[in-house]
Image: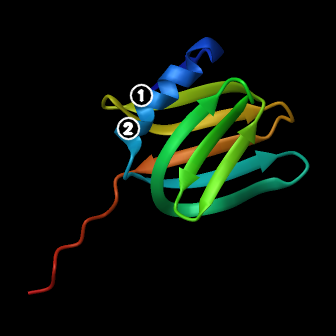
Amino acid sequence: MTVAKIEKAEWHSYFDRVSKELEGKSVEIDVEALALGSQVEQEWIPLLGMTYEPRDDILSVMVEGLNHLIRSPRTVFVDIELGQVSSMEVVDADDYRHILKLSDPLRLTAPH
């Protein structure tokens, strides 16, 4: 596994590009902070897309039924396994850690 820091100047183009690659994967969104502990916001729900808007300084993670907004992100780290993003950690201005774990959806075969 390789951990890479994505520089802020690259966020807009990086998330536009990686959003297309990650579409259809399942995501679990965890939020951790000293004030609130660790909370699972969404468990293994289809990821619809991600985008960073530099003008508003917001990273938006779109999943079915939710638009998870990360306001004023400070750092973005990605874990890469076998050439694919397996997780991300985004730390915002309030030191909240938004952890996105990614997986391919489990495909079940029809019973015989």
Q: Quadrant of residue 85?
A: top left
Q: CA distance from mark 2 to mark 1?
A: 6 Å
Is residue 96 among the parts visible in the rendering? yes
Residue 78 in the image: above or below residue 63: above
Is residue 1 among the parts visible in the rendering? no
Relative side of 108 to 91, left or right: left
Residue denoted by label 1: 17
Kindly identify the amino acid type of the residue bearing the numbered disc 2: Lys
Marks 2,1: beta carbons within 8 A: yes
Q: Residue placed farthest to the left in the image? A: 112
Where residue 20 is drawn, which disc sits there?
2
> Where residue 60 sits in the image (x, y, percent)?
63, 42
Residue 19 in the image: above or below residue 77: below
Relative side of 12 to 54, left or right: left
Q: Quadrant of residue 51?
A: top right
Residue at x 14% of width, y 85% of height: 111
Along the viewing direction, whichever of 3 and 96 lies nearer the viewer = 96
Along the viewing direction, whichever of 27 and 47 lies nearer the viewer = 47
Kindly identify the amino acid type of the residue bearing the numbered disc 1: Arg
> Where residue 73 sits in the image (x, y, percent)?
73, 30
Of the 4 image quadrants, the one containing the C terminus is bottom left
Q: Residue placed farthest to the front in the image? A: 55
Relative side of 26 to 59, left or right: left
Residue at x 52% of width, y 47% of height: 101
